[in-house]
Image: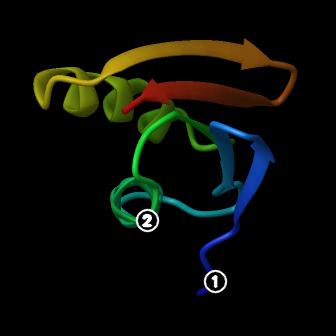
Amino acid sequence: MELKLRQIESDAFELDVRGNTCPFPQIFTELALKKIDRGRLEVITDNPPSARDLPIVLKRRGYRVESEKEGDHWRIKIWK
């Protein structure tokens, strides 16, 4: 499986994990967070359990997280 991480602004990155079910969205998010030094990571998922659980896990780890539904998917913004 490929890590679909791309830079969208000077300090912002996007990770598209649509089509993946648990635990892959969380695994890919953790890998992406290791790749970026600082800034914002926006994770796009269409998996409801990931949209629910990923923000909880990240907040427990001390990240600032916002999540919003956009049509048939969610965008989870994580600040590092």
Q: Is residue 44 visible?
A: no
Task: Say which quarter of the image contains residue 70.
Answer: top right
Task: Say which quarter of the image contains residue 4.
Answer: bottom right
Left or right: residue 36 compared with residue 15: left
Q: Secondary structure at mark 2?
A: helix
Task: Say which quarter of the image contains residue 53.
Answer: top left
Q: Residue type at mark 2?
A: Lys
Verify CB contact (< 8 Å) between mark 2 and mark 1: no
The crowd level at tag 1 (other Cα within 10 Å; few <14, some 14-19, many 20+) is: few
How far across and down, in percent of the image, does residue 77 sit? Answer: 55, 25
How far across and down, in percent of the image, does residue 42 sit? Answer: 62, 36
Residue shown at 56% from the left, 27% from the top: 76
Frontmost residue, 59 versus 54: 59
Mark drawn on residue 35: 2
Image quadrant in which the C terminus is located: top left
Image quadrant in which the N terminus is located: bottom right
Q: Report the residue that reaches farthest toward the bottom.
A: 1
Q: Residue type at mark 1?
A: Glu
The mark that comes first in sequence, 2 or 1, is: 1
How far across and down, in percent of the image, does residue 6 sit? Answer: 74, 59
Left or right: residue 39 compared with residue 6: left
Q: From what the image shows, is residue 44 above or below residue 33?
A: above
Comparing marks 2 and 1, which lies closer to the viewer?
Answer: 2
Residue shown at 69% from the left, 47% from the top: 14
Q: Is residue 75 visible?
A: yes
The crowd level at tag 2 (other Cα within 10 Å; few <14, some 14-19, many 20+) is: few
Per the image, the residue denoted by label 1 is 2
Mark drawn on residue 11: none
How far across and down, in percent of the image, does residue 31 sit? Answer: 38, 67
Residue shown at 27% from the left, 24% from the top: 63
